[in-house]
Image (cartoon, grey):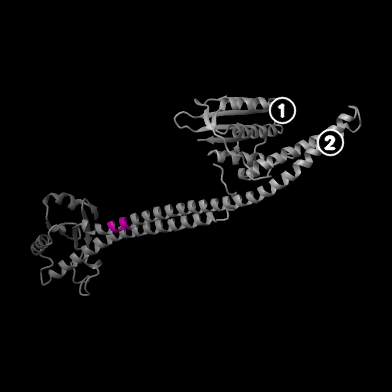
Amino acid sequence: MVKTGSSAEQNRFPRRILLTATALVCAGLFLSALHTYYTLTNLREEYLSNRARDIAESLLSAIRGPGRRNNPAVWDTELAARIEQSGAQLRYLALLDSTGQLLAEACGDPLLLPAVRDAAPGYLENIYLFEYRPSQGRGPRWMNHRTATPGMRLRIGIEDSDADFLVRQGYVHLVIALAAIALLMGVSFSLLKVIDRHLSLAAREESERHFKTLGKMSATLAHEIRNPLGAMKGLTQVVQEELTKDHATQTMMRTVVGEAERLEKLVSDLLDFARPKELKLTQVNLRELIQSVAELLEAQAEAGGIELRTEISAPETVIESDEGALKQVLYNLILNGIEASGEGEKNNRSIEISLRGGGKTGEIELSVCDRGPGIGEEDPEELFQPFRTTKMTGSGLGLPVSRQLVERLGGTIQLSNRSGGGACCKVKLG
């Protein structure tokens, strides 16, 4: 459907600024949520390692006294007690010497022993394995190289599901951010649609007010011009008849009559635009209507070396409409095509008139396509404004009158460039 407001009117709203700002805010939300997710994921390992250090420092604090630190039996007892007390949270404990020799060990599940004994520190299945050297920790001041057994290592395996809440928080932040982004984008596009609709309605109202004022003035002027113009034309034709055919002024007289006829056509167009006739709905056979208008303009087309081609593929060609209005629309569109084709290549001058649609959808599409220069980069809407024309002799009312009639019939009209050169005007009737 052709926009009712001018493109300049609708482009006053800074669409690009709004879309750019929305995109930047959405990108910021997403990057912030992503950063939070990765931060919480990294905190998960730090959280588990801190828990493992706390367990190791607690063990070293519990096993104090002469000869206790170097007694594997004491370690076996303490490690087994810790495993039993912790339930499922502490899965494995072991004491290793500087060479990696296993001195003491306790495990809640004997099936895990082969895996945790040979695995490197890090994540196993549902277990976080950590190795602690007393000199590396952050424990009490008394814990140093002299009080710890040289080279001693504690291997601690804890349940890693305890830290899953951090990852879940990261997921929640990410999901909330994505939902906010989707909501923000939806609101932005809805806002743009509302603004476009508002601007379109405002432009339509302004255009209607302008057309109404212009119509009143045009109707008055047309009425005042028509009578003296008719008298001028009639008197000139009488003088022509009185003079001999080879008289020197005959050429000038024909020019006067031709210009008077052109002014009459302009006056008629003005009246049609200013005072639309009441529609008379009847059963209209579009196939016959197209053929009759094509025959009417065939001589003018042939004079310009232009071929009129018709293609009717609609299964139903009879619709309820106003025959006179449709005939005028089709006449204007074909005439525009003939005039535009005169500027195209001589060996490729043709106008295709096609009728498609109907059937189950009920929508009929009538199109007139030419091989002229097309509309270029110009906004098609501008060509639907009154008195806006690219032709030297045109009145600029053919397309505005056509759109007025089509919209009164409940249809739409669209003008666009044609692939390969030329322009196409499509009329859709429901």
Residue 268 % position (x, y): 70, 39
* Of 402 and 98, the residue lying toward us: 402
According to the picture, the residue beneath numbered tag 2 turns out to be: 235
The quarter of the displayed image where residue 241 is located: top right
* Of 137 and 3, the residue lying toward us: 3
* Few, some or many residues within 10 Å of mark 2 (<14, 14–19, 20+): few
Q: Residue at x 13, y 67 (%)?
A: 69
* Depicted 29 relative to depicted 275: above or below: below
Which tag, 2 or 1, sits closer to the chain's start?
A: 2
Q: Amino acid at mark 2?
A: Leu
* Identity of the residue furthest to the bottom in this view: 141
* Few, some or many residues within 10 Å of mark 1 (<14, 14–19, 20+): some
User: What secondary structure is the magenta-colored segment mainly?
Assistant: helix
Discs 2/1, front: 2
Q: Residue at x 56, y 45 (%)?
A: 3
According to the picture, the residue beneath numbered tag 1 turns out to be: 300
Q: Is residue 36 left or right of residue 355?
A: left
Residue 421 visible? The answer is no
Q: CA distance from mark 2 to mark 1?
A: 28 Å
Q: Which quadrant would the N terminus be assigned to in this image? A: top right
Residue 378 % position (x, y): 64, 44
Look at the image and give the residue range highlighted in magenta. Answer: 168-172
Residue 109 % position (x, y): 12, 52
Q: Amino acid at mark 1?
A: Gln
Q: Secondary structure at mark 2?
A: helix
* Depicted 285 relative to depicted 412: above or below: above
* Depicted 93 relative to depicted 334: above or below: below
